[in-house]
Amino acid sequence: MPQDAFTIRYVADELKNLLCGGKISKIAQPERELLTFIIYTEKGSVKLEICLSAKYCRINIATGEIRAPKIAPGFCMLLRKHLQNAKITDVQQVDGERIICIDLECTSEFELANMRLYCEIMGKYSNCVLVKDGIIVGALKSTAIGESTKRVLFTGVKYTLPEAQDKLPPDDRDGVIEAFKHAGGDRAKFISEKIRGVSYATALDIVGEYGENVTGEQTADYLAGKVYSPCVTYESGKEKDFKVRSYEKDIKKYSSVLEAQTAYYAAVTSRQSFLEISRRLSSVIGAAIKKSEKRLATQEQKLFECRDMETVRLKGELITANIYAIERGMTSFEAVNYYDENCGKIKIDLDRSLSPADNAQKYYKKYAKLKRTAISVTEQREETKTALDYLYSIASHLNSAENETDLKEISEELKVCGLIKETEKKRKQSEPAPFRSFEKDGFKILAGRNNVQNDRLLKSVSARDTWLHTQTYHSSHVVIISEGKLIPDEVLLTAAEICAYYSDGRQGTKIPVAYTMRSNVKKPPKSNAGFVIYSDFKTVLAEPDGHFELRKD
């Protein structure tokens, strides 16, 4: 992404127009490399976000509530001490570098001081440094006193800028034009290597705008900002980058670079957050499934060991029936198996130290123990199978989750199951997420997003509506709101395709989907979320299709 000096110049100019005269109200550090400020301006409250991570370094305007940990990190406490209620007097780019400084008028009970917050947007070297009278008050990332480095960053030393690159300034028009007299074949590479503050991504935009034979005059005009068209570029339907201007066709234009940047990072960070939460929940569910599968395997093994318990009982009976023919000290004997229609013989092992009667009792006791084990483990196995099936259903809904709200509800479900511990006090319950909603030929089709929603969907529809669920896979519950009308085959097939898409079988073809009246669907008492039994159903084979063109939510 072009977080180069060229782009940052526009960001600084727009921040200046937006923030100057504003007062800092709140400061938080929700993550190690993320700072957020709530600033009151004449145009209203603004959330300023300074991210100093290597991948997403930026200074931009963000949306949403400010998040703050219970215990603020040290640098956050330092900023609160000096910058709470401070007035922003200026915002500017520093010497054409990837640095934005914010000048602040700080008022305390004892003095009025001018301070400067340097925001260095430089990839893995990104940093935030608070300076007073040229002396560092504090830095987010400090260097150790004994550390060998060209640039010292810790409290009490003089703040120095990073060493400048030995390149042409972008505003040196004559120099740029002269340099192009010696330009090679790869003009994008030439521009990024010769002109300060221009990334290769921006250089590609310049070449894309004017062609492979772009001239020094055209490059100088581009860098001077004579054409200004902020946008977000897209690739395969996803946000790819934000630009001051772009030659690409798949773009969405904005009125300012700040707006384009905010939209881009809102999408990117949301996607990143979604993936991180999804991976965490997947890990929790995967571990629970693995544990249940191991428990089930152990139970199956115990039942396998009980398979011959009737033979054990038979041996005890045969010893009793033939006790007159057995003597103490015998290690085995053969008896006629009177349960066998062919009256075959069976060999019975004996404990030579026991009497015949005690040998019989030994077999009876072993039989009783195996029988108790079989009864107990059979019940446990059914419970484990039910629990495992429920975990599989949660995993299925996790795979089809579309946003963080879906993940939040799945997370709450896992908390109810005890798979995720409650770490904070329960907050005010938020509004439940809406069902997936579709409309086909005047009929509304609703689909649950998870087990909890499936239960809620079942309660919210009429007994005359049509309910659908895949027969051989875990899936969302889908309902066609018929309002007493006859449902056309095309609508029924569409709903079945949606049901197949939001199931474990979405990668397959010809998925069997059962459908019946809602009145034929029952939820057993104390059953897991999403579990139902149904009767009087018919089946339709459907190709998985999300039908996003019909979505209304």
Image: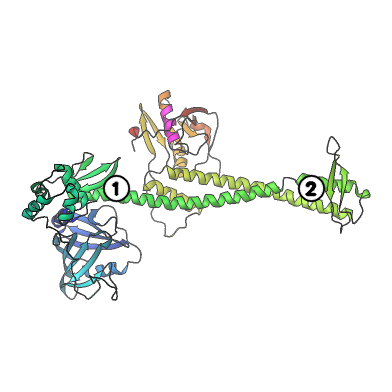
Give the vertical position of 145 relative to 232 (above or below).
below
**Residue 239 picture location, percent across and down:** 27, 45
The residue that label 1 is drawn on is 267
Give the vertical position of 505 relative to 170 (above or below).
above
Residue 389, can we see it? yes
Relative depth, front residue between 181 and 443: 181
Q: Main secondary structure of the magenta part?
A: helix
User: Dot 1, how many residues are within 10 Å of its Cα: few (below 14), some (14-19), or many (20+)?
Assistant: some
Q: Residue at x 83, y 37 (%)?
A: 340
Residue 221's disc is: none
Q: Residue at x 84, y 48 (%)?
A: 348
- Where are the magenta residues, as a range? 492-503
Where's the C terminus, which quadrant? top left
Residue 429, can we see it? no
Relative depth, front residue between 25 and 207: 207
The residue that label 2 is drawn on is 312
- First in sequence: mark 2 vs mark 1: 1
Relative depth, front residue between 51 and 343: 343
Identity of the amino acid at label 1? Ala
**Left or right: where 82 falls relative to 215:** right
Give the vertical position of 287 relative to 458 (above or below).
below
**Residue 428 picture location, percent across and down:** 38, 54
Q: Residue at x 34, y 32 (%)?
A: 550
